[in-house]
Image: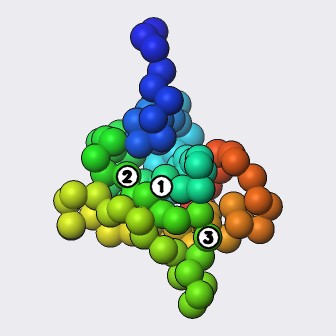
């Protein structure tokens, strides 16, 4: 196995593919979320996790905006990719627990 990237936009697809390959994560917009340096990185809503690439990752500011909504810092270049409906949950949990961490969520 080669060197694992430390770039969050590369780590998210890598970790999500690993979950997908093991059969542990199926739903687009779920899987791993990573918070690093006051930014949060998350997969988009409708792209299958096995097809996810670094260019598809949303970057959010670490806190919800004044209306309690996710604050997108950088959207994917492909404008057809929508923000995950779980974005607000991820950001809320990261804000509530104030951690530099990785979260995993999976819908039932």
Q: Which residue is mark 1?
A: 42
Residue sitting at 68 percent across and 46 percent down?
Answer: 101
Element at label 2: loop
Q: Which residue is mark 3?
A: 63
Give the distance between the C-alpha atoms of the residues marked 2 and 3, in whole angstroms: 17 Å
Q: CA distance from mark 2 to mark 1?
A: 6 Å
The reply to whether residue 18 is visible in this rendering is no
- Could you tell me which residue is drawn at 71 percent across and 66 percent down? 95
- Residue for badge 2: 57
Q: Is the Cβ of the residue at disc 2 closer than 8 Å to that at disc 3?
A: no
Q: Tag 2: Cα neighbours inside 10 Å, few (<14), some, or many (≥20)?
A: many
Tell me where residue 38 sits by quadrant: bottom right
- x and y percent of residue 91 in the render? 61, 66
For marks 2 and 3, give the one nearer the viewer.
3
Residue at x 54%, y 56% (from the top left corner): 40
Q: In the image shown, does 6 or 27 lie closer to the viewer?
A: 6
């Amino acid at each position: 196995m080669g060197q694992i990237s430390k770039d969050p936009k590369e780590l998210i697809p890598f970790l999500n593919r690993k979950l997908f390959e093991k059969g542990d994560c199926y739903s687009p917009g779920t899987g791993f979320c990573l918070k690093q340096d006051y930014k949060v990185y998350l997969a988009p809503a409708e792209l299958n996790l096995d097809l996810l690439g670094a260019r598809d990752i949303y970057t959010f500011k670490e806190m919800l905006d004044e209306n309690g909504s996710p604050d997108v810092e950088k959207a994917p270049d492909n404008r057809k990719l929508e923000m995950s409906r779980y974005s607000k949950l991820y950001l809320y949990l990261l804000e509530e627990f104030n951690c530099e961490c990785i979260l995993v969520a999976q819908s039932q």
